[in-house]
Image (tube, coloured by chain):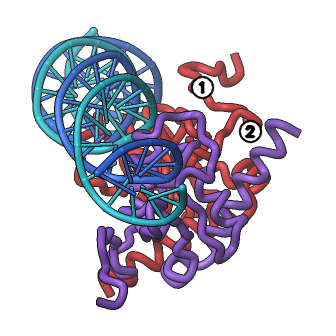
Chain colours: A purple, B red, C blue, D cyan
DNA sequence: GTCGTAGTTTGACATCCGTCGTAGTACGTA
DNA sequence: TACGTACTACGACGGATGTCAAACTACGAC
């Protein structure tokens, strides 16, 4: 077979993504850090373990799933790793500038609280 | 006395407002409707009862309090009514364009799901 | 086949959340 | 003072949430 789709992951279609779900997904500090990290990578993929969150593995899994089910990130398996990317195109099409302004707000707050 | 500040309500200072709190406050459909309603009014105040939500009075009180404590709205008593306004200036200063893009996203989703 | 790495699943736990109804408080007006 | 309006406070309830530890699965490399 050519690249059997093993261990497929459920993602909402673009039209199934809901604003409330996206906002809720982004309202957790850990998840916001993940999204900010992924945004900084551009199109490059990141494994779940690439992002340093001071929480257990199972909690990490949980947060990534919330982000995926809200339609914020896309996840695919590559060997033993699970790679993540932001669904920028889908989010921008549905909610123009939303992601950008949330990321900007996050950066602003970080600067404000730590700088 | 000249306008004794009876029944004062606690509001977070601008610098106490947190992005996660704002996003969480906005991630509930009822609260998003309130914010959208207030935004449409501009600087004009609205009483809690002006907004038609199909929920009980106590739940309405709860949602307005969440919005106030997150720093999204300002509430003051005027006689028996409690008037609400968006804290646009504070939010725009902290998180430029965030409110605008969330409101735009909300409008877009409404159009998409109902139009 | 064995091992290590990466992530999942399950179950538990405390907390928070959205909701309600009932009873209560504050205020304006008659 | 009595009444109606507008909102609050309290207590309850079911369900979601964030967290963990322990046991498990999938994959690549040796």
State the quadrant of the N terminus of chain B.
top right
State the quadrant of the C terminus of chain B.
bottom left
Q: Which residue is mark 1?
A: B10
Q: Which residue is mark 2?
A: B14
Compared with D23, B24 (above or below) is below
| Local secondary structure at mark 2 | helix
C28 with respect to B97 (left or right): left
Q: Looking at the image, which residue is at 64% across and 21% down? A: B5
- Outermost residue, bottom side: A2
Compared with B90, B104 (above or below) is below
* Residue C8 drawn at (x, y percent): 32, 52
* Residue A65 drawn at (x, y percent): 39, 55
A82 with respect to B62 (left or right): right
Q: Nearer the viewer, residue B84 or D19?
A: D19
Judging from the image, mark 1 belongs to the subunit labelled B
Judging from the image, mark 2 belongs to the subunit labelled B
| Local secondary structure at mark 1 | loop
Picture quarter containing residue C14? top left
Q: Nearer the viewer, residue C2 or A102?
A: C2
A87 with respect to D22 (left or right): right
Tell me whether marks 2 and 1 sit on the same chain.
yes
How many C-alpha atoms fall within 10 Å of the one at disc 1: few (<14), some, or many (≥20)?
A: few
Can residue B84 be spotted in the picture? no
Compared with A114, B102 (above or below) is below
Q: Looking at the image, which residue is at 56% across and 44% down? A: A30
* Residue A13 drawn at (x, y percent): 34, 79
Q: How many marks?
A: 2
Q: Nearer the viewer, residue D5 or A96?
A: A96
Q: Which mark is residue A10?
A: none
């Amino acid at each position: 077979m050519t690249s059997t789709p093993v261990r497929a992951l459920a993602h909402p279609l673009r039209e199934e993504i809901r604003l409330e779900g996206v906002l809720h997904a982004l309202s957790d500090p850990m998840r916001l850090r993940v999204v900010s990290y992924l945004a900084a990578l551009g199109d490059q993929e990141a494994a779940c373990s690439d992002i340093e969150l001071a929480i257990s593995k199972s909690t990490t899994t949980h947060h990534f799933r919330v982000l995926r089910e809200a339609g914020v990130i896309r996840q695919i398996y590559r060997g033993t790793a699970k790679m993540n990317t932001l669904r920028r195109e889908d989010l921008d099409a549905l909610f123009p500038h939303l992601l950008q302004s949330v990321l900007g707000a996050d950066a602003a707050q970080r600067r404000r609280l730590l700088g």
